[in-house]
Amino acid sequence: MPSVAPVRRFLPLLAWFGWSAGLALLSARGAESAPASGGGTVTGRVTYKADSARPWPLGRYYLSGGALAEAVVAIDGPGLSAPASTPKTIWMDQNNFQFVPEIAAIRAGDSVRFTNSDEALHNVMTFQGPEPFNVNLMQGREHTHLFASGRGLEQQILLTCVYHAAMRGWVYVFEHPFYAVTPKDGAFRLENVPPGEYQLRVVHPAGELSWQQTVTVKSGAPLEIEIALSPDQKKK
């Protein structure tokens, strides 16, 4: 059976392209299901300032010119109900002993289709969320799981493979459409957010980073926020 340890150190080009494409799809997910009009727009970019005294070994996989990829950005607070959207199914592959993409941010009622592109036997398992599951996947097989409910950033659903401990993925399930996953350039856009005062929150599960700030959203008014993270935002 292939060794898992070198995988993180040598990310193949194919997996990188698949990862980037998956992030682009997920970052657009919230905007697709948002209400048609009547709210404000929150945009910005998430960056990370490295500190040589507190190095982040995995930073090379998520940083590009200081921009932070695979950060989940979301609005949190009361009054965020939105019309139900048509359920969607997103794809998360197991490729080169990694979940690709590593992060899924979806709306309650959406599904994730898990596949295995490796020759090795893989597994998708989680004990978190309202419906834990544990499924073996041989090469070419798939399993689709419906995430009927969730609590957004308050409830990360960690995915693992029982056969390869280094493999990790995360799913966040929201009851509203005001969320995004940052692609390689760290940018995010949340559209048609109902007017009000909220917490704008960011988590980066692989980096164990967490940030939040109170924001006021006004109807028809754009709000642009540059979010700068550092080791100071590392979860305690």
Image: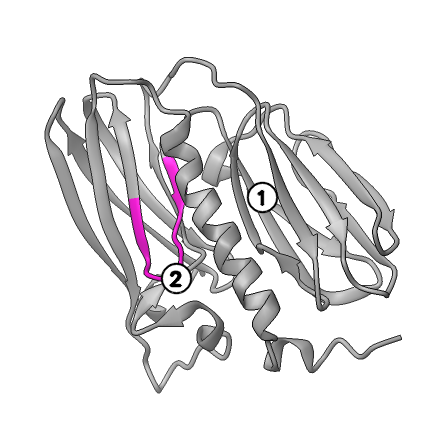
Please name the residue shown 80% across and 43% down the image: 142
- Decide which of 38, 201 is in the foreground and name it: 38
Q: Is residue 204 positioned above or below 83 on the image?
A: below
- Decide which of 160, 146 is in the foreground and name it: 146
Label 2: how many Cα within 10 Å (few below 14, some 14–19, many 20+): many
Point out residue 1 in the picture as x, y percentages from the top left corner: 89, 75
- Decide which of 173, 129 is in the foreground and name it: 173
Q: Which mark is residue 235?
A: none
Q: What residue type is labelled 2?
A: Lys
Circle 2 sits on which residue? 184
Please name the residue shown 85% across and 65% down the image: 119
Horizontal relation, residue 163 to residue 173: left or right: right
Please name the residue shown 38% across and 16% down the image: 82
Point out residue 216 in the picture as x, y percentages from the top left corner: 15, 32
Q: Which amino acid does label 1 sit on?
A: Val
Q: Residue 184 lies in magenta, yes or no?
A: yes
Q: Give the range drawn in magenta.
A: 179-188
Q: What element carries label 1?
A: strand
Point out residue 54 in the picture as x, y percentages from the top left corner: 39, 81
